[in-house]
Image (cartoon, helix red, strand yellow):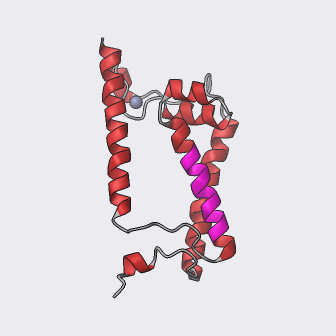
């Protein structure tokens, strides 16, 4: 018997109206996030200061991420990596997810097939681990 989770991960599956509506909503939210970064400049834009950085002098896990996304949106990948190493990858992921959402909403079918439902939590743990290792390494370098 196919579980509900794995059944929902089959490519080509016809999406319900609510699922298509969800794709539209997520796609619009991602497009708005990417679009917002296009209107801002990586340097000089008004951005609130990080309270953690203000208090400790050390960057938190998300310090520089907004400027990194803005630089990546303007095509400056190296500049984006200077602000936050993961910014260009996050921008690429948002663009890909936005396109997949749009394509699935228009087609009315699932396009991306994930192999196993249990793959997603593991991938999230790997990404979170990379993020934490990068953040700790950056903080150590800043303290030296
Ligand atoms: Zn911060």
- Which residue is rendered at x = 60% and y = 53% of the image? 96
- Which residue is rendered at x = 30% and y = 20% of the image? 140
- Which residue is rendered at x = 56% and y = 82% of the image? 16
Q: Can residue 74 be seen in this view?
A: yes
Extreme-top residue of the structure: 144
Locate residue 72: give its quadrant.
top right
Residue 126 in the image, given as x and y percentages of width and height? 34, 47
- Which residue is rendered at x = 63% and y = 51% of the image? 32
Does the magenta run of residues contain 128? Answer: no
Residue 121 in the image, given as x and y percentages of width and height? 33, 58
Relative horizontal placement of residue 51, taking residue 23 as reference (left or right): left
Q: How many labels does the image show?
A: 0
Extreme-bottom residue of the structure: 1
Screen quadrant of the C terminus: top left
Residue 87 in the image, given as x and y percentages of width and height? 52, 36
37, 80: nearer the viewer: 80
Q: Quadrant of ligand 1?
A: top left
Relative horizontal placement of residue 106, taking residue 94 as reference (left or right): right
Q: Main secondary structure of the magenta part?
A: helix
* Magenta segment: 92-104
Above-or-below relation of 144 to 35 = above
Above-or-below relation of 128 to 22 = above
Q: Is residue 46 visible?
A: no
105, 39: nearer the viewer: 105
Relative horizontal placement of residue 118, taking residue 88 as reference (left or right): left
Above-or-below relation of 97 to 108 = above
Above-or-below relation of 2 to 60 = below
42, 75: nearer the viewer: 75
Residue 93 in the image, given as x and y percentages of width and height? 54, 49
Screen quadrant of the N terminus: bottom left
């Amino acid at each position: 018997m196919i579980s509900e989770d794995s059944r929902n991960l089959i490519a080509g599956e016809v999406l319900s109206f609510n699922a298509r509506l969800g794709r539209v909503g997520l796609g619009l939210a991602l497009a708005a996030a990417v679009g917002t970064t296009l209107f801002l400049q990586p340097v000089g834009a008004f951005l609130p200061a990080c309270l953690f950085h203000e208090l400790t002098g050390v960057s938190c896990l998300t310090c520089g991420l907004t400027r990194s996304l803005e630089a990546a949106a303007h095509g400056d990948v190296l500049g984006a990596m200077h602000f936050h190493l993961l910014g260009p990858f996050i921008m690429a992921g948002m663009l890909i997810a936005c396109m997949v959402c749009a394509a699935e909403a228009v087609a009315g079918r699932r396009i991306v097939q994930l192999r196993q439902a249990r793959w997603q939590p593991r991938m999230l743990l790997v990404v979170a681990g990379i993020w934490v290792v990068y953040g700790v390494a950056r903080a150590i370098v800043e303290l030296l």
